[in-house]
Image (cartoon, helix red, strand yellow):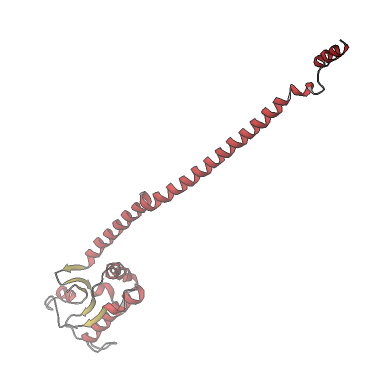
Amino acid sequence: MAIFRRMRDRRARPREDDGDSGTIWLTIYSDMMTNLMLFFLMLFTMSRLQTGLREDIQEALKDQFSGKKIGQKVEQKRDDAQKMEELKKIALVEETESRIKITLPAPVLFEIGKADVKAETGQILSNIAKPLKDSKYPIIVEGHTDNIPISGGKYKSNWHLSSARAFAVLNYFIEKEGVGPARMSALGYGEHQPVASNDTEDDRAKNRRIDIILVKK
């Protein structure tokens, strides 16, 4: 009986670690919540990084394929059209099946009796240079004068003056604008291919000109 009593007392007596068994679940729960918080924090951080990267990619695609690039192209076309309208005010552009001819009055580009391109009007040739570079046609630069003989000065005749002016324009296109020299040639005709009579000053002014010809055929 004493043995059974001792066994009953032993079952009834609390274990030494019963004081900790009531709180150990708090430690496990706390660890689990900490791990979950870290896990969700990591997911949130990755989500933000991916969102930022996606936004960067979308912005790059917009720049490349939509508004900004298209806006720049539209603006460039508008500028080119405006330059062409300005060019038409001082130049005559004619096109046939065999050629495109741009005619510039000589006084626009040169001082009287000289063959140096004016610095303030070089932009005119720069505006013309772009379509010349974009094309693959041979380019001929022709110089023309009126029939008034040259007396004194650097050039012996209108032929010499017209040739020098044609070569000056050719050199401008090559050296300043990068037009391929293999496609270019220059000719001077003096007063021998007039487009108007030389009877009046207005007609003589029409004959003093530079023709830039793109040979299509």
* In the rendered image, the vertical position of residue 194 relative to residue 73, given as above or below: below
Residue 86: which quarter of the image? bottom left
Residue placed furthest toward the right: 2
Residue 49 is situated, as x and y percent measured from the top left of the image, at 53, 44
Could you tell me how many numbered marks the image carries? 0
Residue 55 is situated, as x and y percent measured from the top left of the image, at 46, 45
Quarter of the image that includes the C terminus? bottom left
User: Is 60 positioned to the left or the right of 85 in the image?
Assistant: right
User: Is 103 positioned to the left or the right of 126 in the image?
Assistant: left
Residue placed furthest toward the front: 1
Q: Nearer the viewer, residue 127 or 39?
A: 39
* In the rendered image, the vertical position of residue 105 relative to residue 7, given as above or below: below
Q: Nearer the viewer, residue 81 or 210?
A: 81
Residue 111 at least partly seen: no
Quarter of the image that includes the N terminus? top right
Residue shown at 34% from the left, 73% from the top: 178
* In the rendered image, the vertical position of residue 213 relative to residue 87, given as above or below: below
Residue 64 at least partly seen: yes
Residue 169 is situated, as x and y percent measured from the top left of the image, at 29, 77
Residue placed furthest toward the top: 1
* In the rendered image, the vertical position of residue 59 relative to residue 152, given as above or below: above
Residue 32: which quarter of the image? top right
Residue 203 is situated, as x and y percent measured from the top left of the image, at 14, 74
Q: Nearer the viewer, residue 202 or 186?
A: 186
Residue 160: which quarter of the image? bottom left
